[in-house]
Image: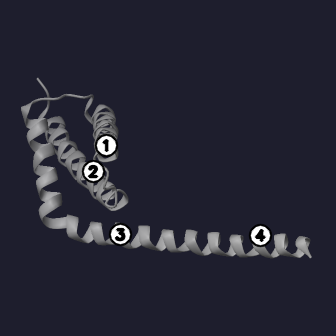
Amino acid sequence: MINLDIQILILFYSFISGVIFGIGFDIYRVLFRDVYYKVFRIIIDHIYWMVVGVLVFIFLLNTQYAILSFYTYFYILLGIIFYTKCISIFIYRIINNLVGFLLEIIRYIFKNLIYIISRVVNKKNY
């Protein structure tokens, strides 16, 4: 028999793993929202589910010795529902803004590198 304290921790970590699952899904939505080809979407979907499944399993393995019962799955589902209904809007905006900011930085660096390279190449031609 497992102590009540350990059972509460198991349910808490299951809930947290559901929230982690939701955050992973928001990151996935932001990064791959512009993939329109069905074959690529299917491949990316499978990779996402495999990666998130492994990460959640590793998280549960490290926190509760991978005790998977009905209640574990139930609390993972509750964590996902809680995240999508209450927190997802804010986290999605933050991730979207962060990715946009990082893309702007990469675009700025790439644009300046192209400019420098074109100036060096044009000087050699004269």
**Residue in front for this viewpoint, 3 or 72:** 72
Task: Answer few, some or many: residues within 10 Å of disc 3's Cα (few below 14, many 20 plus, some between 14 and 19).
Answer: some
* Residue assigned mark 1: 39
Q: Are marks 3 and 1 in contact (CB under 8 Å)?
A: no
Image quarter where the C terminus lies is bottom right
Determine the residue positioned at 34% across, 71% down: 94
In percent of width and height, residue 119 lies at: 80, 76
Q: Amino acid at mark 2?
A: Ile
In percent of width and height, residue 117 lies at: 77, 69
**Residue in front for this viewpoint, 126 or 97:** 126
* Residue assigned mark 2: 20
State the CA–CA distance, disc 1 to disc 2: 27 Å
Image quarter where the N terminus lies is top left
**Helix, strand or loop at mark 4:** helix
How are the residues colored? one colour
Q: Are marks 4 and 2 in contact (CB under 8 Å)?
A: no
